[in-house]
Image: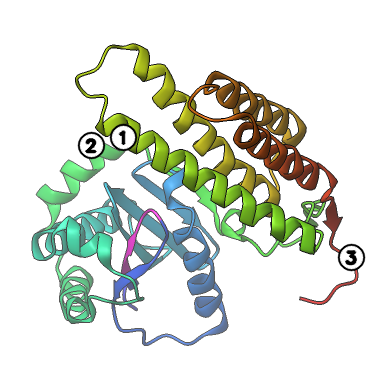
Amino acid sequence: MSMILFACVVRVRDGLPLSASTDFYHTQDFLECRRRLKTLALRLAQYPGRGSAEGCDFNIHFSSLRDVACMAICSCQCPAAMAFCFLETVWWEFTASYDTTCIGLASRPYAFLEFDSVIQKVKWHFNHISSIQMDSSLEKIQEELEFQPPVVLTLEDTDVANGIMNGHTQIHLEPAPNFRMEPVTALGVLSLILNIMCAALNLIRGIHLAEHSLQVAHEEIGNILAFLIPFLACIFQCYLYLFYSPARTMKVVLLLLFICLGNIYLHGLRNLWQILFHIGVAFLSSYQILTRQLQEKQADCGV
């Protein structure tokens, strides 16, 4: 029986399989090991460069460097040094064939299907080469493993998926609060329209004043800011009305304060009615934001 039964190359950050050897084994134990290998691939970023998950009949070995990891299912008789030597060879072959950009942009499983034959050849070579021919390579890997031992897991440790740990203990998680805002009212739509109009007026006046004040004294800078800051405040008021945000009341008060102070500062560039209009719209928007409540999603709602 071959010592190296299956091998694959995966992307470390998300466990995406990039290439794999041909699978000729269909026993229940082997298929279960394959399933656990897929689960482990999703968690490789949590582990150091080398590791093994040991089982009764099969072991999973993995070796990762940068964003590429090689994984293998081996028989229990396969020496760890031989498995990691094989994985290192596959890693060098793969990274020599594809650059990091191609690897990072891969979006579908087994995007490098043409590399499967390379894995198959390397696997055949390691399964049929004599131990005497591999002595020098195995000694080097063995020294590295003694100096820096790989992390050792059990196959059961890899089985953390769908809220089940170790196949026995269920993790009870409280559902995250799922809130929706109440429907937008007609008065709310009106406040949005008026707010956008005030923001546009502030932006146009601010840009116009800035264009004609490039060679004017620094006093004009205050007027420009008095237009642009309320512009930003109006936009943020629209956002707070449409979307939920924590500390909403404090943000509403600060935005209202900025708009009021900015318009009072502009007394002289705006008449009293214009200032009252902008401040009135700001108060209306603030009222609409604070009165639009959160609506909790019902627990029995279907997905």
3D distance between C-alphas at marks 2 and 1: 5 Å
Above or below: residue 239 compared with residue 93 = above
Magenta stretch, main secondary structure, is: strand
* Residue at the image position 43 percent from the left and 22 percent from the top: 223
Q: Mark 2 points at which residue?
A: 143
Q: Which of 237 and 153 is in front in this view?
A: 237
3D distance between C-alphas at marks 1 and 3: 57 Å
Q: Nearer the viewer, residue 29 or 210?
A: 210
Mark in front: 1 vs 3 = 3
Q: Mark 1 points at which residue?
A: 146
Badge 3 element: loop
Q: Position of residue 225 (x, y in %)?
A: 43, 24
Apparent side of residue 100 relative to residue 49 in the rendered image (left or right) = left
* Residue at the image position 53 percent from the left and 72 percent from the top: 35
Above or below: residue 256 compared with residue 265 = below
Q: Which three-letter amino acid code belongs to the residue tagged 1?
A: Glu
Q: Is residue 152 visible to the viewer in this orientation of the structure?
A: no
Residue 298 disc label: 3
Q: Which three-letter amino acid code belongs to the residue tagged 2?
A: Glu
Q: Nearer the viewer, residue 14 or 115?
A: 14
Q: Do the residues labelled 2 and 1 touch (CB within 8 Å)?
A: yes
Q: Position of residue 252 (x, y in %)?
A: 71, 33
